[in-house]
Image (cartoon, rainbow, N blue to C red):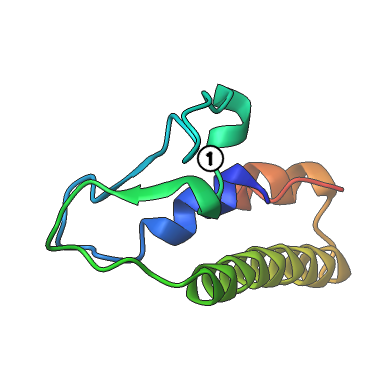
Amino acid sequence: MDKRYLQKALSTFNTDKHQWYGWKKYNDDGTKIPNDQRMCYECLILNDDTATMPTETEVNAKIEELKQEETDKETKKASAKSKLEALGLTTEEIKEAFGIWAY
């Protein structure tokens, strides 16, 4: 699971709570969880008793939504760049005027 998307997805839940979640440091058997393995749904814990734990399905759905939004944004950027080039603008002009980089 991409940790960046997990963090973004979790930030959309319990928006009225500050730092509502954290990560387990130890497994149920008492063994320490390595830091590079802690940031996953299975290690998610509530830091706020009034927060609601989203289901893994809800979190995964939000991750997919965020990924799709990012893909759509890139697609729109590419489309805009293509249309601007069709109007005769150079890649450099597009970059300077609109911040759309050539790919």
Instruction: Write the residue at 16% across / 52% down.
Output: 48
Q: Is residue 34 left or right of residue 90?
A: left
Q: Position of residue 1 (x, y in %)?
A: 68, 51
Front residue of 81/24: it is: 24
Q: Is residue 102 above or below residue 79?
A: above
Q: Position of residue 4 (x, y in %)?
A: 57, 45
Front residue of 1/90: it is: 1
Q: Tag 1's secondary structure?
A: loop
The amino acid type, in three-letter code, at marker 1 is Met
Q: Is residue 55 above or below residue 44?
A: below
Q: Position of residue 22 (x, y in %)?
A: 34, 41
Farthest front residue? 29
Q: Is residue 58 left or right of residue 52?
A: right
Residue occupied by mark 1 = 39
Is the residue marked by circle 1 packed among few (<14), some (14-19), or many (20+) residues within 10 Å?
many
Q: Is residue 2 above or below residue 63?
A: above
Q: Is residue 63 above or below residue 40?
A: below
Q: Position of residue 99 (x, y in %)?
A: 62, 47
Instruction: Write the residue at 64% across / 66% down.
Output: 73
